[in-house]
Image: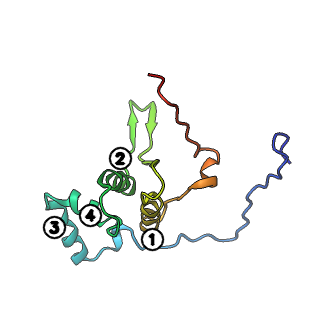
Amino acid sequence: LTQRSGFPVFQTYVSANHIRKKEDASSAHNLSEADRKLILELAADPNIGKRIIASIAPSIYGHEHVKMSLAMALFGAVPKNVDDKHRIRGDVNVLILGDPGTAKSQMLKYAEATAPRAVYSAGKGASAVGLTANVHKDPI
């Protein structure tokens, strides 16, 4: 039990005799030559950004800025190591705030279903450690 919350705290323990990495079906070395050719053709398209945005949650009209942020989160960024002192992760996190009924959850669920490592959190689960947001009204 933790003294602060009184809830039991469990540790994860795994005992194994042998571990084998499962083949990643989405990895680059599993691409066929036709897939590589298609990817290079899409990369040469000057409107590829607009096509990607249009392909994210296509049943939801508008919200291009939200869809662009989801695309950036799905593709990620390049990790950087500044002067070999400070490492910046390439993960992109997205927080969507808005009025009820503006398809926020549907777009996030679409992104979660698309990306294998995506984590969707909304409502009470969003108040867990590391997912808490705070908004202050500007006094001006």
Which is closer to the viewer, label 1 or label 4? 4
For the point 35% across and 65% down, the residue is 60
Residue on which the image places disc 4: 54
Question: In which quadrant will I find the C terminus?
Answer: top left
- Give the percent coordinates (x, y) of residue 109: 47, 64
Looking at the image, residue 45 sits to the left or right of residue 4; the answer is left
Residue on which the image places disc 2: 78
Residue on which the image places disc 3: 41
Colour convention of the picture? rainbow
Element carrying mark 3: helix
Residue on which the image places disc 1: 24
Question: Of marks 1 and 2, which one's residue comes earlier in the chain?
Answer: 1
Crowding at label 2, few (<14), some or many (≥20) Cα neighbours within 10 Å? few
Q: Are marks 3 and 1 in contact (CB under 8 Å)?
A: no
Question: Of marks 1 and 4, which one's residue comes earlier in the chain?
Answer: 1
Q: Amino acid at mark 4?
A: Ala
Distance CA(mark 3)–CA(mark 2):
22 Å
**Quarter of image, res 37:** bottom left
- Give the percent coordinates (x, y) of residue 47: 16, 59
Question: Of marks 3 and 1, which one's residue comes earlier in the chain?
Answer: 1
